[in-house]
């Protein structure tokens, strides 16, 4: 199985979609998951936190798409449907836009390769003319020279993971869990569809889904799905009263958001190598 | 001798439009000046120094370039990054390589090429915008591109104070473009059926 | 017409003796190489690289030089100091001088300033070291700085035989410094992104 290195989640998603000649709406989450796990395994010891976090973004994106797909097609009945459709269209647009830049990057690469065959004349001026050059305007004093030197000598700023491209978690998983606990204790068993019917937006559906997973971890619920892509039934198996502790792993990320230096990025690793090449040239 | 009447034709070159007696012809002057420069020179600069109209400079340069190509010379005159400059001909690359001290340009990674294309079409553009388009943090690549002289800072966005980036004239040189208008259109890379996508829910 | 018999003479060029199909002709190869070299190249060197007998190289170069002169081109091929190099033609000197004097090349680029600062604080330093610090090839800028008299060669590194560079007394003069000890210490100046630096992995 040939696996290429992907340039981020959009790239991976596009790669998997084109490989299976699938419509984005038809992407099967488990298929992509299996392939991703195969991909990670194939890299062996190179297993990479960065790749994994990229995948989480892809998974969130796919979840979003799947949520949109579960909508009855045809008419848009209320604002929730509209929001989901908009979210999906936005993702389409972003993927298509990304693909266009990816294509044009190939053109750039080709042009650069062709252009590299032509060498410009870069020869010092004949001695007869060199001393006629107008007096050099240095334009800087010793302090500015020192400033420039400091900037050049400064270690390259540490790689940081930008999360600005991720979804703003507007919903708290803990709060969503509390809603689910209350409802499931009352109903005993419900479909995920009905449990999310009142969600205000995609972000809330995602948070509620994560809350279900958290409750499963706490052994408070069990799942049943009668057929692939069919309705997911959630059954309450926890205590009939008392607090259910749900981790706040997800909600914390919002506070960490603005702190740099939280990890490394794949791009930067490549850049290091590239800079090295330039230095040796 | 039969060709005595045809004096002046032996060189096979057209006479330029109006050489002053005693002064070098315009084409020779252009060749001499372009031989000493180490960056592209704009037609308008040449026009000022040589005191000729820009259109005459432009047409003479094109004539010279055409003549070099027709004669299969090892050098070529090309208009790149807003000016004219002598280049070696691509066919001679393998031989020239052995004499050029700077050697081969390091190849850009896929990440760098993608980032470069986003900057090229969206300039001036912030790192956050590039990250949003690529779906992945591009800060490190942007630093590489800046260090390579392909991209430079271009002020800050008034609202966000985010640093903006644009491509440099060295970028144009590396791509062999006269100016940014020569960038290939992005539209053909978008699928024809973009509009259809909105139709899909039906 | 009287000169019908003389076909083949119209271009004024002799046919080169034996170009391989698909390879550039010898004359084109010589033109391309001589366009990019920055010091005269010996006929023997050209003969080795092009894998032709030296006498063929020699005669082709003389042919080219004669042709440029006959056509009144602005450049000239001359044999100087045991090698061949392109020069501007003497008749064009006045115009080239005017161009050079009026030139806009009097300001150093950011790349040149960066390179200059590295040389100033790390001298004597090799080009490879400067490239490693700047993260980008700096050979071209180093040539500019040398040509401008701000930087000069300072022997070679014993192990690598790499040429070392240092700043000149003209550099000190231009910066208004008595000697290098007067260069500001680097410590008090902190880079803009100091917060990020603190986050660096220990």
Image (cartoon, coloured by chain):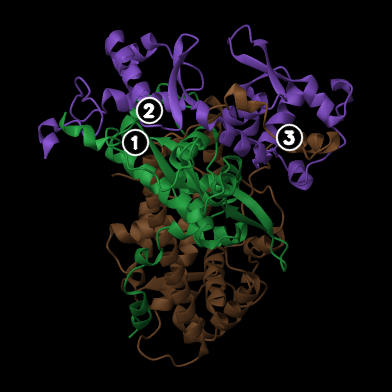
Chain colours: A brown, B green, C purple
Q: What residue would you read off at disc 3? A: A136
Crowdedness near tag 1: few (<14), some (14–19) or many (≥20) residues, C-alpha within 10 Å: some
Mark carried by residue B90: 1
Mark carried by residue A271: none
Determine the CA span between mark 3 and mark 1: 35 Å
Question: On the rendered structure, is A200 left or right of C59?
Answer: right
Crowdedness near tag 3: few (<14), some (14–19) or many (≥20) residues, C-alpha within 10 Å: some
- Give residue B125's quadrant in the image: bottom right
Residue name at image x 52 percent, y 34 percent: A273
Give the structural element (helix, strand or loop) at label 2. helix
Q: What residue would you read off at disc 2? A: C68
| Chain identifier of the residue bearing label 3 in the image | A
Residue A201 or residue B160, whichever sits in front: B160
Question: On the rendered structure, is B187 left or right of C14?
Answer: right
Question: On the rendered structure, is C23 left or right of A278?
Answer: left
Q: Is the residue at mark 3 from the same chain as the one at mark 1? A: no
Residue B138 or residue B42, whichever sits in front: B42
Quadrant that contains the N terminus of chain C: top left
Q: Position of residue A165 (x, y in %)?
A: 57, 62
Determine the CA span between mark 2 and mark 3: 34 Å
Q: Nearer the observer, disc 3 or disc 1?
A: 3
| Chain identifier of the residue bearing label 2 in the image | C
Q: Residue furthest top?
A: C158
| Chain identifier of the residue bearing label 1 in the image | B
Question: On the rendered structure, is A275 left or right of A114?
Answer: right
Residue A5 appears in the rendering: no
């Amino acid at each position: 199985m040939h696996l290429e290195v992907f340039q981020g989640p959009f790239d991976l998603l596009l790669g998997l979609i084109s490989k299976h000649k699938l419509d984005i709406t038809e992407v099967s989450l488990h298929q992509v998951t299996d392939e991703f796990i195969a991909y990670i395994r194939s890299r062996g010891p190179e297993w990479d936190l960065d790749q994994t976090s990229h995948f989480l973004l892809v998974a969130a994106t796919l979840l979003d798409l799947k949520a949109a797909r579960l909508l009855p097609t045809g008419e848009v009945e209320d604002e929730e449907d509209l929001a989901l459709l908009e979210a999906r269209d936005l993702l389409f647009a972003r993927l298509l836009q990304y693909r266009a830049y990816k294509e044009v990057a190939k053109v750039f690469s080709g042009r650069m390769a062709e252009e590299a065959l032509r060498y410009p004349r870069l020869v010092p001026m004949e001695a007869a003319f060199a001393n006629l050059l107008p007096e050099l305007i240095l334009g800087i004093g010793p302090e500015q020279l020192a400033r420039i030197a400091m900037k050049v000598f400064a270690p390259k700023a540490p790689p940081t993971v930008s999360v600005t491209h991720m979804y703003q978690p507007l919903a708290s998983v803990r709060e969503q869990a509390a809603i689910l606990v209350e409802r499931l204790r009352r109903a005993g068993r419900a479909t995920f569809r009905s449990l999310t019917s009142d969600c205000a937006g995609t972000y809330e559906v995602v948070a509620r889904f994560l809350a279900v997973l958290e409750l499963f971890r706490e052994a408070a619920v069990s799942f049943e799905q009668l057929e692939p892509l069919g309705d997911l039934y959630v059954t309450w198996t926890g205590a009939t009263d008392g607090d259910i502790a749900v981790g706040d792993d997800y909600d914390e990320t919002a506070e960490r958001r603005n702190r740099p230096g939280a990890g490394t990025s794949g791009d930067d690793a490549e850049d290091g190598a590239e800079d090295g090449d330039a230095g040796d040239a | 001798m039969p060709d005595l009447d045809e004096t002046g034709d032996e060189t096979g070159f057209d006479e330029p439009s109006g050489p002053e007696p005693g002064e070098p012809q315009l084409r020779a002057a252009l060749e001499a000046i372009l031989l000493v420069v180490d960056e592209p020179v704009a037609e308008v600069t040449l026009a000022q120094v040589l005191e000729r109209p820009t259109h005459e400079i432009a047409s003479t340069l094109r004539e010279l370039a055409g003549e070099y190509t027709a004669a299969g010379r090892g050098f070529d005159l090309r208009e790149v990054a807003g000016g004219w400059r002598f280049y070696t001909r691509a066919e001679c690359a393998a031989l020239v390589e052995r004499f050029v001290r700077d050697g081969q340009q390091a190849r850009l990674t896929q990440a760098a090429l993608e980032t470069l294309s986003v900057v090229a079409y969206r300039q001036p553009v912030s790192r956050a915008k590039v990250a949003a388009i690529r779906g992945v943090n591009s800060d490190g690549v942007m630093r590489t591109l800046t260090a390579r002289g392909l991209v430079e800072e271009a002020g800050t966005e008034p609202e966000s104070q985010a640093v903006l980036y644009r491509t440099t004239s060295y970028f144009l040189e590396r791509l062999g473009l006269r100016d940014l208008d020569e960038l290939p259109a992005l539209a053909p890379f978008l699928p024809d059926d973009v509009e259809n996508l909105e139709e899909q829910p039906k």
